[in-house]
Amino acid sequence: MIGKRIQQLRMERGLSLSELAERAGVAKSYLSAIERLIQINPSIQVIEKIAGVLDVSVQTLIQSDKQAADEAIDPGWVELAREAMNSGISKDQFREFLEFQRWRLHREDE
């Protein structure tokens, strides 16, 4: 949710609610309502102001949690998983391989 993302970014930057509201030119009560998910559909103008102060893109604020997670995945891993799927390796086979690797690494550490 946009409110939780704003709150997280605000806190990461060490800004109080009052500081962000003042710098963005948004009422503190309105910003508080956004962060507490009472106001779940802020205007694009407000989002742009907040994004500017937080130094992030509007897209960063409005993207879903799933989109953010998808972007956080290394594309190389995604391609590797696709290759495994296309080669006919099942999820169970892949899990068995991972378990074997963990076992092997554990043995090497002993």
Image (cartoon, rainbow, N blue to C red):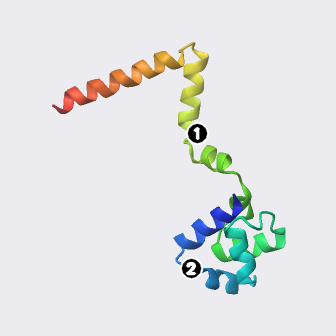
In this rendering, the answer to whether 4 lies above or below 89 is below
Q: Residue at x 64, y 62 (%)?
A: 5
Q: Residue at x 70, y 61 (%)?
A: 2
Q: Which marked residue is nearer to the observer: mark 1 or mark 2?
A: 2
Total marks shown come to 2
Q: Residue at x 58, y 33 (%)?
A: 78
Label 1, residues with CA under 10 Å away: few <14, some 14-19, many ≥20: few
Report x, y in % for residue 72. 57, 48
* Lower position in the chain sequence, tag 1 or tag 2: 2
In this rendering, the answer to whether 40 lies above or below 89 is below
Disc 1 and disc 2 in contact, CB within 8 angstroms = no
Give the left or right position of residue 67, taking residue 15 as reference: right
Report x, y in % for residue 34. 72, 69
Q: Which residue is mark 2?
A: 15
> Which residue of the protein is positioned furthest toward the top in this rendering?
88
Q: Which residue is mark 1?
A: 75
Label 2, residues with CA under 10 Å away: few <14, some 14-19, many ≥20: some
Identity of the amino acid at label 2? Leu
